[in-house]
Image (cartoon, rainbow, N blue to C red):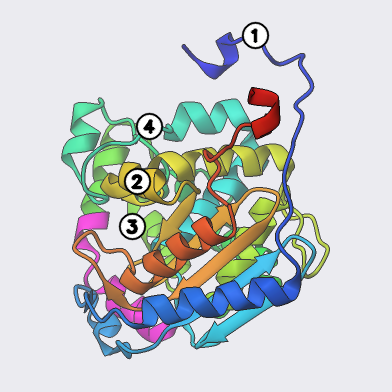
Amino acid sequence: MRASELDVSDIEQTVSTGAVPPDERLDDLLDAAHARALAHEEGTVADYIPTLADADPTSFGLCIADVRGGLHEIGDTRAPFSIQSISKAFVYALLSEQVGHEEAFDIVGVNNSGLAFDSVVAIELNDGHPMNPMVNAGALATTALLPGDADEKWATVHEGLSRFAGRELTLDDEVYRSESETNQRNQAIAMLLQSYGRIRHDPAEVVDVYTRQCSLLVDARDLAVMGSTLADGGVNPVTGERVVSAEVCRDTLAVLAASGLYENSGEWLFEIGLPGKSGVAGGLVTVAPGKVGIGAYAPRLDAAGNSVRGQIATAHLARSLGLNIFASDSHFSAGARA
């Protein structure tokens, strides 16, 4: 059943959230999460994009940005890296802000494909329809649907992601060149989407804008602030600027919960219980709605392409801070049960 068929549009949505601990307690838990993850040296640095192979495998930064504007950092939180696939979530939010809930749903989709992020088979199996905006086909369709020509699309992406981060982000020219020389698969996906009528612009230009958006430089602090903006209904808690609507945040987080970590999204949601998005440069953003955004950077990746230390630290914080959106306890006291 489609969301539009559920007959709930006239019901006012109520939002109920808890609170994070005081700053001192939050810092203590952040230190503990960092120390736990630091003990792990598993994983390998991505090398399918040549420039990424130069990352320092020991680098590790962890940041929490709460919706009150507080920042809590430890480690290499200002080490720059390319945002890569994490950009997909925020570009999808920008598109949804412009075209609305229904059109974004119709064009891009929201279901997990169960296949690899760059799968061509998933496109063919679904008659040319991208399954969700977190896989490459859906991300390319999302970027293609932004208004204007290639320069205008890029301006929308660059300015929009900078507003999410609360500062102007810069392009890593070396990463951009490296990816441009090795993105033949994305070019093929874009041309396949064009053959199905899902992309109505020059596919080469769409891939170029998408490659540039993946090459924007961020750090763990930026990811935490970007995540906290989604957590706070679209208002950047550091700058106070509204970036997108609360409805767009809800939709974006729902898509992230379903597909943010690709074919491992179910396991992530089962263990962590929060919407999140990873990138092959080692970044990881996680969102606890109404509470915090968590940004992590650690370039050693597991077999699925997700930061090993980032996942371990985030799991620790999700449990110790009570962030899991599925966790609950009985409101009855022991005495009331008796």
Mark 4 vs mark 2, CA separation in Å: 11 Å
Our reading of the magenta stretch's main secondary structure is: helix
Residue type at the position of mark 2? Ser
Disc 3 or 2, which lies upstream in sequence?
3
Name the residue carrying label 2.
265
Disc 2 or 1, which lies upstream in sequence?
1
Residue 275 image offset from top left, x and y in percent: 50, 48
Indicate whether 159 appears above or below 114.
Answer: below
Nearest to the observer: residue 38 or residue 170: 38
Disc 4 or 3, which lies upstream in sequence?
4
Picture residue at 60% right of the left edge, 52% below the top: 288
Of marks 3 and 1, the one in the foreground: 1
Residue type at the position of mark 1? Asp
Residue type at the position of mark 4? Asn
Of marks 4 and 3, the one in the foreground: 4
> Quarter of the image containing the C terminus?
top right
Name the residue carrying label 3.
204
Disc 4 or 1, which lies upstream in sequence?
1
Name the residue carrying label 4.
111
Residue 59 seen in this snapshot: yes
Name the residue carrying label 1.
7
Q: Residues within 10 Å of mark 2 (few under 14, many from 20)?
A: many
**Does residue 144 appear to the left or right of 261 in the view shown?**
right
Q: Read off the magenta span.
A: 172-186
SS label for mark 4: loop
| CB under 8 Å between discs 3 and 1 | no
